[in-house]
Amino acid sequence: MGSAAAYHLAKRGLSVVAMEQFVPGHDRGSSHGLTRIIRLAYFEHPSYVPLLRRAFALWRELEAESGKELLHVTGAIDAGEPGSRIFEGSLESCRLHRLTHEVLGGREVNERFPGFNLPDDFKAVFQPDGGFLEPEKCITAHTSLAAAHGAEVRSGCQVRGWRREAGRVVIQLDVEEVHAKQLVVCGGSWTPRLTPSLAPLLRPERQVVGWFGIEEPGAFRLGRFPVFVMTTPAGHYYGFPEFGVPGFKIGKYHHRAEAVDPDAPMRAADAEDEAVLRECVQSYFRGANGPMVRSSPCIFTNTPDEHFIIDRLPATPEVLVVSACSGHGFKFCSVVGEIVADLIGDGRTAHDLSLFRLGRF
């Protein structure tokens, strides 16, 4: 969110200082790991769909400006038992927004996409526009183009705090202060420390994805296997075709429900992490039930309702908080960057943000 905000703000000619405590594209948050799903049919809430339409368009514009391929369309499967939130919510979004889609049974999914092994009684929405983004490349593109448009991008620059002073914001760094008319906080799991008033609403949580050895390579290759989200009796899972590195990549939403301190060392995946993921692989993706050849931990920062926060702090309207994306925010970076530029530059946006207001809490 921060790299996209810096890009859109700078592109509009505003004076921008972007501060990152590590380096853009680092592996300490939730924006790494080679691939991030982007879905147009959105089970979480139908009001995300207009934002996603704009996000798709802006990702393509970023590709054109950067000269980099960032978005890969694979189609998307949203599956589960009839009545499950993922299937029914995805179908509702498709019908409400008239999205191109098909409703398939479990056997039909398996026949069309042989990497799957879904039960016959499962139902799935197939939406052909879904796919995945390459997050590190997206962040690099946003950051480098922000600098090209005049933004000052500082890496290894930790924000120690901030204060309001005479209607402005003073940002405290290790050895200096930055004075600004407005501050945009895109702090991810560090948001509770940067905005303590929001700390009771935010829960950083350890997440792990794994790559499993593939016995049927053709079934999981790019162009043959779609991205997916799926509900099973064990929970909600998501996955990708093989891309960039060997293996079938899969994760489980909320994994082991472990709260974490973002400043603590990130614990590597262990046997229990593998077991959480293999439970789904061996039941529903048998052709990829080989050894776990790679893993990557990251951090989700969850709100109570798992919707985003995009709003100004009530007591400090100079501060706009854009964070706490509950594990499903990356795909929206392009449009959220535009929203930030609207709110900072114009004081308003045409995008509907009612789902993300602090007042709902």
Image (cartoon, helix red, strand yellow):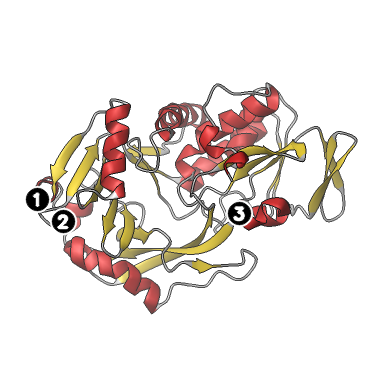
Res 41 quadrant in image: top left
Q: Are marks 1 and 2 in contact (CB under 8 Å)?
A: yes
Q: Nearer the viewer, residue 206 or 231?
A: 231
Give the labeled residue for mark 3: 201
For the residue carrying disc 2, how many other residues have a C-alpha within 10 Å: few (<14), some (14-19), or many (20+)?
many
Please give left or right for residue 26 compared with residue 71 in the image.
right
The residue under the point 48% across, 44% down is 330
Q: Residue 272 at x, y = what percent?
A: 38, 77
N-term-proximal mark, 1 vs 2? 1
How far apart, in angstroms, are the residues tagged by discs 1 and 3?
Answer: 42 Å
Q: Nearer the viewer, residue 115 or 279?
A: 279
Q: Are marks 1 and 3 in contact (CB under 8 Å)?
A: no
Mark identifier at residue 107: 1
How far apart, in angstroms, are the residues tagged by discs 2 and 3?
Answer: 37 Å
- Is 313 placed above or below 296 here? above
Q: Quadrant of the N terminus?
A: top right
How far apart, in angstroms, are the residues tagged by discs 1 and 2?
Answer: 7 Å
Q: Nearer the viewer, residue 151 or 120?
A: 120
Res 60 quadrant in image: top left
Q: Nearer the viewer, mark 2 or mark 3?
A: 3
N-term-proximal mark, 2 vs 3? 2
The residue under the point 61% across, 40% down is 359
Query: Which residue type carries mark 3?
Result: Leu
Please give left or right for residue 226 compared with residue 27 in the image.
left
Please give left or right for residue 92 compared with residue 170 in the image.
left
Q: Nearer the viewer, residue 129 or 123?
A: 123
Give the labeled residue for mark 2: 118
Query: Which residue type carries mark 1?
Result: Arg
Query: Which residue type carries mark 2?
Result: Leu
Q: Nearer the viewer, mark 1 or mark 3?
A: 3
Q: Residue 130 at x, y = what percent?
A: 32, 38
Please give left or right for residue 140 compared with residue 129 in the image.
right
